[in-house]
Structures are given as structure tokens and as C-alpha cells.
Amino acid sequence: MNTTILRRSLASGWRGLLIVALAVAAMLALGLWVYRGFDLSIYDHLPQAVRALMGIPLHADPALLAYNEMLAAIGALAFVGVGIALGAQSVAGEEQDRTLHLVLSTPISRTSYVLSRAAGVVLLMAGGGVVLWAVAALMPHLVGTATGDAHILALIVHLTAAGIFHASLALAVGAATGRKAAAAGVAAAVMVLGWLASSLLPMWRAGAAGWVPWTWFNGSKPLVNGVDGGYLALLLGGSVLLIALAVVGLRTRELRLLASGPSLLESLRANPYLGRLLAPTGRGTSLLGLRLAAQQVLVGYVVVLMGLIMGLAMPPMFKGLSGIMDNFAATFPQTMTDLFGGGDLSVPAGFLHLETFGMVAPAAVIVVATVAATSGISGEQRTRRMSLLLAQPISRARIFSTIALTSALYVTFVSVALFLGSWAGIALSGIDVSIGKLVVACLMVLLLGWFFGALALFLAAATGRSHVATWGVTGVAVATYFGYTLLLAAGKESVAWWSPFRPYLYGPPLIEGVAWWQPVWLLVGTVVLLGAALPLFIRRDIRITA
């Protein structure tokens, strides 16, 4: 193991974990404050199977419900997402930045490099877990509420192990392929699909989700029942196996010094309507074409995930579960539904809103929009290509507008795939969902993605730093989402006018449609952020060194 590589890993990864910890701390404080006045006796009358699925025991304390939502749900997704980003960057990211071959030209073996990187990821995730534990233990004292019988440390131990597992998966895929987008895409798909499967499969048959990694994290409800040694062994043992595969994967292949051909770009050029726009110029490939090709793998994964899985598969899943869904929905508290964006599990549109449009679809468009914005400005600056580009007769305004258009097109691809997949799934299953409201809901997904893409552009243009833009957007997204849903659950929905998720979730659009102010809010916010970002990018000095 190389201590220099280890220190470099630690120095480059702590910011994202700190931002997520601060966002979770803010949401946990708000959750504890909101829930302390809740009468949770309604949960005592739920069937035992429903309480077990929700992780709420008899005579639960309000603090336990807040921990369950802030740490075991959205906080866990954010924390594990940071781990995936760290794992994908560890090998594949260095290779993509063309610095890995320089490091390996020094007296360091590939095995030592991978193990040093893996040790850095494990230490960062463990440190992040310690920070989350400290935050979770401190917040009740600051808010003035009791923690009750919540096993906070057990939940944090499981969460840390889950973060290490998914980070190791991203590390293994990146080491084997050299593709950062593939590494992040595969690990993120395992996380999202695991989260969905661990929630839905037990409703079909008990124990059906025992093979899912997300079940190993939260299937035993460690917040209520404490540490589960078997599941913990699966997560940590799987992490060791994946790190070993990462070592083998890097040792047995050649490094990629150049990117492969832009297959997505070639496909778009074949379209008669887009071919002229994306055709090569006399000086080479168009600037827009280069930007569209830059993140084609990640966008491809997200398009497939949203089109085929979340779009096409969810309507038939509701039809298959319809026999038990009515009884389950009747016992499911409205406050719990509100925490995931509102809706009604007893009707098809409400089920699709909760499972697809409430959380997964926003996460998908925010990811692709942020990646396009940060890689186009701060990413090019980090790899020292921005100064070379500006040396050509190309204005900064044109570069900025091209990056903004790329981000908008990425979001459009995902939104259209979601619409087409959902439309096909609705038609195949024959469930009763208005196609007109489906169009409106997908339009709101599009506008939400544009808003957060503009936010990422603003942060990248102002600072030129990828981590500021990426984790800044992550923190804002987590805080505004749960800021809105917590206030919605508390019956104070109108107070959350400041959150972009209020115009997105209000209704919800798939059930009720939208009012005029909802798309206007997001459009105006997008225009304001873009208008503020452009002069910042034009006037800022470009940093040549990192």
C-alpha cells in the first residue's frame, strides 16, 4: 500500500461527505422538530406486517420516525451515492483524466495502487459514518427531544457498510473497464433498483428481497432491531471480494489513453433533423457534438433505467400487486406518503408518482444535468483543456450556451425515455392513467432537471471547481426535497414556497395536473440562474493549475 496515494485519496474525497453530512444534519433537525408534536398512536393500529415493512415498532417515539426517514431513506441514498462517486473516481476517473498512466510510471504496482485507493475509500466512508453518527446523536439535544429506543449506532454501522459495498462495486467496474460513467452507472443502478426491490418485493412475498444489497443494509431494520451480523457480513464480505476483483481487473488489461468512438453522437447524426446541426465543420467535430458525446455512457444508463425499468416495468408491477395494494394503502399513513412526495397508493397514478416521479425521476435528471454542467465547465478546466479551447476563435458565451444546451438535451433524453416507457407500460398493463397528465408530469420532470442544471452551471461558472458544483447541487437537492416533504407532512405545505420541489410535487401532477404557477416557478428560476451564471463565467479568470 502506498501512503502517498492514500493521502491523495483522503484529501480529494472528504468534501462531498461533509456536504452530505451537513445536509442530513439540517434535515434531521427539521424532522425532529416537526415530528416532536406528532401523535404516533395511529401507527400502533397498523398491521404487524405493515409496521415491519416501515420499520416502526409499537409505541414508537417521534424521533425514531425522523431517523427512519432522514438516515435510513434519503440520507442513506445520498451517503451511498457519495461512496459510488468516490469509487468511480478512484481508478476509472484517474484514467479518464489521463493521470493514471503517469502515476503507474513511478515505482508503484497496480496492485498497490488499487489497494491504496480502496483503503482511502473505506477510510472516507468510515469517517463519514462517524460524522453522521455524531450528527445523529447531537441533534436531539439541540432540538430538545428524546431519541427513545432508536439504535442509531446500529443504523450507522449498516449504512457505512452499504456505502463501502457500493463504492467497492464502482471501484471494481471502473478498474475492469476504465470507464468512470460505466462504474458510476452500474453501481447507481444497483443502489436504486435495490432500494425499490427491498420496498416492493416483500409486499409480494416475504423474504423475496433477501438477495438485494439494499436489504442487507436496511432489511433487518437496524434502527429498531440493532445490528444484524449476517447482513453485515454479506456487505463487508462482498466489499472484500469486489476490491479483489478490482485488483485483478486493473492488472489484466491495458490502460485507455483515448476515449472510444462517440456512438451516441453518430446515432444522433443519422437523424435527418439533427444531422445538419451536429455535422462536423471544416475545423472538426462541432462543439455541441463533442459535449453530447462526453457523457454518453452515463446518459445511456440513465435512459435505459428510466425508460425500460421505471417507465415500462412499474405499471405492470402495480397491476400485479393490485390484489394487496388496496389493503396496504388503506393502512399506510398519509404522513408517510407525504414524506415521499405525496400521492395515493390505492390508484395507479398515485403508485407511479410515489415509485417513479416522486424521488427516482428527479434524481435521474438532476444527475445528468449536473454532470453535463460540471464536466463542461469545471471538468474541462480541471483537465486544463478549457484554456486551449478559449485560445481558439470561440467566445465564452458560445461555450457557455453550448454547455447549457447539452445539459438541457441530456435532461430531455431522460424525460422523453421516461414518457415513452411509461406510456408503453400503461398501454401493456391496461391501468387507468391519463396520458395527458403523464405528459404534464414528464414536462415537470424536464423543467426540474433544467432548473438544477442551471444551478450546477451557476456554481461551476462562479468557482470553476467540480466538487463545489456537484456537492453544492447535491446539498441543495437533499435539503429542498425533504424541507418540502417534511413541511407537507406537518400540514405546512405553503411555507415551503422557496423549494423547487414544491412546484414539481404539488398536486401531484400525475394525479391532479398542474396549475399555471408550477412550470412558471421552475422556468423563471432556470432563467435567473443562467442569467447570473453567464457574466460570472465571462469575467472569471481560468485557473491553469488545480
Image: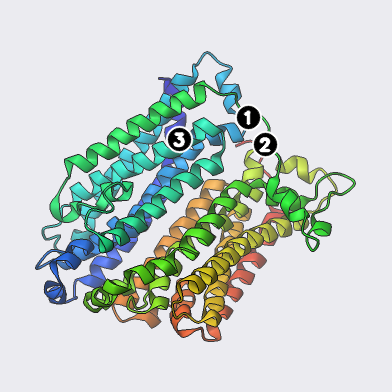
Note whether 333 is above or below 112 in the view shown: below
Say which label, 2 or 3, has the lower sequence index: 3
Which image quarter: residue 50? bottom left
Can you see residue 266? yes
Q: Residues within 10 Å of mark 1 (few under 14, many from 20)?
A: some
Q: CA distance from mark 1 to mark 2?
A: 7 Å
**In the rendered image, which quarter is residue 326 located in?**
bottom left
Farthest residue, direction right: 282
| Front position in the image: 137 or 182 | 182
Q: Amino acid at mark 2?
A: Ala
Q: How many marks?
A: 3
Residue 539 x/y as whole percent:
71, 55
Q: Position of residue 241 (x, y in %)?
A: 35, 30
Mark 3: give few (<14), some (14-19) or many (20+) Cα within 10 Å: many
Residue at position x 57%, y 74% in the image: 443
Q: Secondary structure at mark 3?
A: helix
Instruction: Identify residue for label 1.
Output: 256
Label 1 close to label 2 by CB (< 8 Å): yes
Q: CA distance from mark 2 to mark 3?
A: 19 Å
Q: Which residue is mark 2?
A: 259
Mark 3 — residue? Answer: 171
Q: Is residue 123 above or below residue 330?
A: above
In x, y percent, where is residue 28?
29, 61
Query: Which mark is first along the chain, 1 or 3?
Result: 3
- In the drawing, does residue 288 fall left or right of residue 378? right
